[in-house]
Amino acid sequence: METLSITPELTLRVEMLLASYADAIDDERYDEWPSFFTEKCLYKIISRDNQRRKLPMGLMYCDNRNMLRDRITSMRSANVFEPHTYRHALGRTLVTDGGDGSIAARTNYIVARIMHDGQTDLFSTGRYEDRIVEAEGKLLFRERVVVTDSTSTDALLVVPL
């Protein structure tokens, strides 16, 4: 397999993908969320402790784009939760060759949760571990594993991180 050349331009494209992803969630454009992923994909939220111990149990697990769509449909029509929004702050992304034709990317994040009454809390910190591929001239997540620093998570984990 050919080695992927990690150029400044590729790194910028990856960082723009991550920024666009966070912007869609922060701006409550949840219906756009699945479009950031390939049809067959993995989206998982797992604690750092479980990941280190190689325990597969996570907080959220979707393995295809239809499951992502179902997650948004459920959030909009079936789940009962106090209205809130997120605001992401992303660190610089470390971009490397994924070794299988994909781009590997690691990005630290902090997410604040803003409740309908204006109360703002630090909701989640951690890192994104991504496998990104190019399809039809566009970068998409083949895998997005959200590794949370904390082992406890608020019951309001409804909106994707």
Image (cartoon, rainbow, N blue to C red):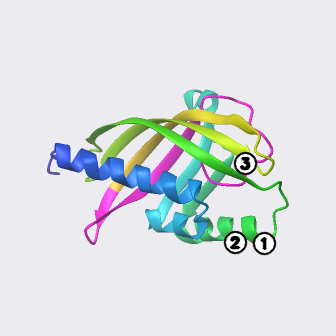
Query: Seen in the image, is 89 located left or right of residue 62?
Result: left
Residue under label 3: 157
Query: Seen in the image, is 157 located left or right of residue 36?
Result: right
Front residue of this view, candidates 58 and 138: 138
Q: Looking at this rendering, what residue extends furthest in the front direction?
A: 118
- Region of the chain picked out in magenta, as a range: 133-161
- Crowd class of label 2 (few under 14; some 14 to 19; many from 20; radius 10 Å): some
Helix, strand or loop status at disc 3:
loop
Position of 53 relative to 116 (above/below): above
Res. 73 mark? 2
Q: Where is residue 95 shown, x and y percent of the image?
A: 29, 40
Q: Where is residue 96 shown, x and y percent of the image?
A: 27, 39
Residue under label 1: 77
Three-letter amino acid code of the residue under disc 1: Ser
Residue depicted at x 78% and y 72%: 77
Front residue of this view, candidates 111 and 51: 111
Mark 3 or mark 2, which has the lower sequence index?
2
- Crowd class of label 3 (few under 14; some 14 to 19; many from 20; radius 10 Å): few
Q: Where is residue 144 shown, x and y percent of the image?
A: 48, 50
